[in-house]
Image: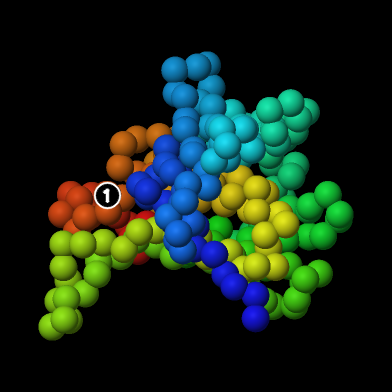
Amino acid sequence: MPEATDLVFKPNNVLNTKIFDGRDGKLLYEVTTETGKPKPTTIVKGADGQVVASWEGRDLRSHKLRFGSSGSPISARAWLKKSRNPFSSNVTFDDPSGRTFKWRGFAAGFSLALYCDSIEKDKCIARFHKSNPVPNEDGSKSSKMTHAKLVLDETGKDVQHMVIASFLMLERDRRGNEQGNETGYRDGVLGRPDTAAGAMLLSGAMSGPGL
């Protein structure tokens, strides 16, 4: 059976983080956000240092997205299409071959999960697992936290860059909305520290489940 890959976020911050392969610990991506420019600019680089994707703007309404270092900029809102149903939490994007991928769970209190009926109907291709306390043997919560991770099925490997870019943009907005923070650039909102003590410090700002 195809093997899934754990894409581990260290730290759990979608603006500034490193993403590692959970199997061997190798660096896969580095995400940095420059806030000193007229518009915040997020850059995703692969392990080789090459730019995978970049976007500028504070949310999906204003993001200008570019794949690679020389790709033409496109509107992120035009690529990541929200459902017209106001009660739906789905967002779709198309890959170059015309397949449509659907992120479910783009709403406060949910976790994003990716599907593509063209690959296999109702099969989850990628799912985000939030950082949570590691239980002690007696069932109590320890001071350790699991690392947040995006679990990617083998069938989604050929669009991995698109999966990463779309996830980072959507999760940034989802977390900002969850915390009632329009810009989402305040320290601590976009990434919870990977310790239980750090989580407690942020608990006052939490209105939904852990990030």
Q: Nearer the viewer, residue 144 or 105?
A: 144
Q: Is residue 152 left or right of residue 147?
A: right
**Residue 198: x percent and y percent?**
20, 50
Q: Secondary structure at mark 1?
A: loop
Quarter of image, res 54: top right
Q: Nearer the viewer, residue 135 or 182?
A: 135
The residue depicted at 58 percent of the width and 37 percent of the height is 48
Which quadrant would the N terminus be assigned to in this image? bottom right
The residue depicted at 31 percent of the width and 63 percent of the height is 146
The residue depicted at 16 percent of the width and 68 percent of the height is 142
**Residue 152: x percent and y percent?**
58, 64
**Residue 120: x percent and y percent?**
75, 76
Q: Is residue 31 above or below residue 8?
A: above
Q: Nearer the viewer, residue 81 or 20?
A: 20
Which quadrant would the C terminus be assigned to in this image? bottom left
Number of disc labels = 1
Q: Is residue 94 left or right of residue 207?
A: right
**Residue 76: x percent and y percent?**
68, 39
Q: Is residue 63 above or below residue 158?
A: above
The residue depicted at 48 percent of the width and 56 percent of the height is 21
Q: Nearer the viewer, residue 149 or 172?
A: 149
Q: Is residue 136 left or right of residue 44?
A: left
Quarter of image, res 153: bottom right
Q: Is residue 92 visible?
A: no
Disc 1 marks which amino acid? Pro
Colour treatment of the image: rainbow
Q: Is residue 117 visible?
A: yes
Q: Around disc 1, counting alpha carbons within 10 Å, would you say few (fewer than 14), some (14 to 19), or many (20 or more)?
A: many
Q: Is residue 176 above or below residue 160?
A: above
Q: Is residue 1 above or below residue 173?
A: below
**Residue picked out by circle 1:** 193
